[in-house]
Image (cartoon, grey):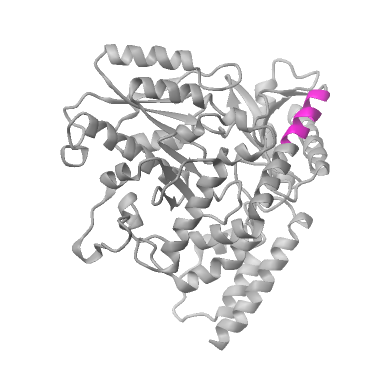
Amino acid sequence: MDELRRAGRAAAELTADYLAGRREHPVWQPVPEPDRGWLTGQELPAAGRSLDELVDDVRTRVLPYPMGNGHPRFFGWVNSPPSPAGVLVAPLAAALNPSCAGGEHAGVLLEHAVVRWLAELIGYPHAPPAGLLTSGASMATVIGLAAARQHAASQDGWDVREDGLAGRPPMVMYVSEEAHSCLHKAAELLGLGTRWLRTVPVDDRFRMDVGALRTMLARDVEAGLRPFCVAASAGTVSTGTVDPLDEIADVAVEHGLWLHVDGAYGALGILADGAAAAYAGMARADSLALDPHKWLGVPVDCGCVLLRDPATARDAFSLVPAYLRDDSAAGFGWFSEYGPEQTRPFRALRVWATMSHLGRDGIVGLVDQTVGLARTLAEMIEAADDFELLAPVTTSIVAFRCRPGDSEGRLDELNRGIPAAVQHRGRAFLTGTRLAGMEALRACFLNPATTAEDLVVLLDEIRTVAAEVAR
């Protein structure tokens, strides 16, 4: 234990120094060949190495090459910096090392609490055990859509777990053009087939077109197909757009569809000042995915699925051997009965620490601050002659284009080349997307350390590399 104490102290100091010094280092940098070779090509040592040596290797070979998401000028994808509280307790969760499949221990009991906290934050109706933590929104989506499939089959009088989908009318699901790819993956994994995944057009604000949804539904019903689910977005990854959830929920009720809401990134945006109206209808979802490891900054991995009726998910997944049967869990059973994971890590400790450290006021402040930064950047873009805002700012994502005066006819080529060029310079990090057939830039704000001055640096970096790309 002396070696663990010594190395543990060194690792704690190294962690604190790394987090404190991110602004002074490049956001991202390529890994030079010697370290790349070491990272990918090292041999398993024949004799064990000391913990001190391992910490030193992390210091010299790992920490210098981050993804970049801890830096205040990282605006790529939807990746947050880690919360200090989540980092603090991660080793303690590892020290306990429980399986949170079920049973009566702190890991399981704390998970019930933090799932309730998340539901309460976004105003989602919750009665335990109506939700569980997952590896991320991809797994949360699989659980939500499996419950939807189970519900539809049960309504039609057959057992999808026993009989499968063969010989049944195709089950049809509806998603928007801006839907996340995890919905497509889930449809494939669940045997639904992407042929029966309908892509609904979006309006000029990149929201699902409800009129088009109704038209597609009517056509599929007439063709003898089985519409069973509509998946809406509460914050898309390209623009942060929130679909007209209340209208979509009305359609779902009229047609007996399961409503799944992908709020992986954006569900917490409901907390921003003046944002609640845009989220009307989110609480009507049958299942809802959200990621504490996005806006909240809980260290990866940690997603969550919330369920209006948990019994449907339990019907879809429960397969309990006699040696795992638990009749004392207040009728809830084990968490492993509500999803595909059997051995489950102690994710709840990182969520509990992060949310407790921030408190509700701190969480609201974080959301307000980052949404405010997005709105500020949008104003800067609209005031500039060489940028163009492509979508209204709903959450903390800004979608835009760089369009210098001499670039007409080459805008797609220019904007396609900008993200990688900005990344390689190391002063800021953003990514691209495609909107309405156009190459676009997008900046996502999740870091509480980001300032308005960082926005100036971002636009200056884009202007600098745009001139280089144009040449």
Q: Report which quarter residue 146 is drawn in.
A: top left
- Residue located farthest toward the bottom when viewing the structure as drawn: 2
Q: Position of residue 447 (x, y in %)?
A: 69, 48
Q: Position of residue 215 (x, y in %)?
A: 40, 12
Query: Which residue occupies 21% across, 33% down?
Result: 165
The residue positioned 50% from the left and 33% from the top of the image is 282
Residue at left offset 57%, top offset 67%: 89
**Which quadrant holds residue 217?**
top left
Q: For residue 346, say whether it is visible.
A: no
Q: Percent from the top left, x then y, of residue 18?
A: 70, 64
Vertical relation: 402 (above or below) 87: above
Query: Is residue 304 on the magenta stretch?
Result: no
Q: Nearer the viewer, residue 368 or 236?
A: 368
Please identify the quadrant where the C terminus is shown.
top right
Evaluate whether residue 209 shows in this view.
yes
Residue 325 lies left or right of residue 129; in this view the side is left
Give the dominant element type of the magenta stretch: helix, strand or loop. helix
Of 327 and 410, the residue lying toward us? 327
Q: Is residue 214 above or below residue 168?
A: above
Give the left or right position of residue 380, taking residue 283 as reference: right
Q: Residue at x 27, y 37 (%)?
A: 150
Q: Which quadrant would residue 19 be assigned to in this image? A: bottom right
For the image, the number of numbered tags is 0
- Chain part drawn in magenta: 374-384
Instruction: Give whichever of 360, 387 is nearer the camera.
Output: 360
Q: Is residue 189 above or below residue 13?
A: above
Q: Position of residue 293 (x, y in %)?
A: 55, 51
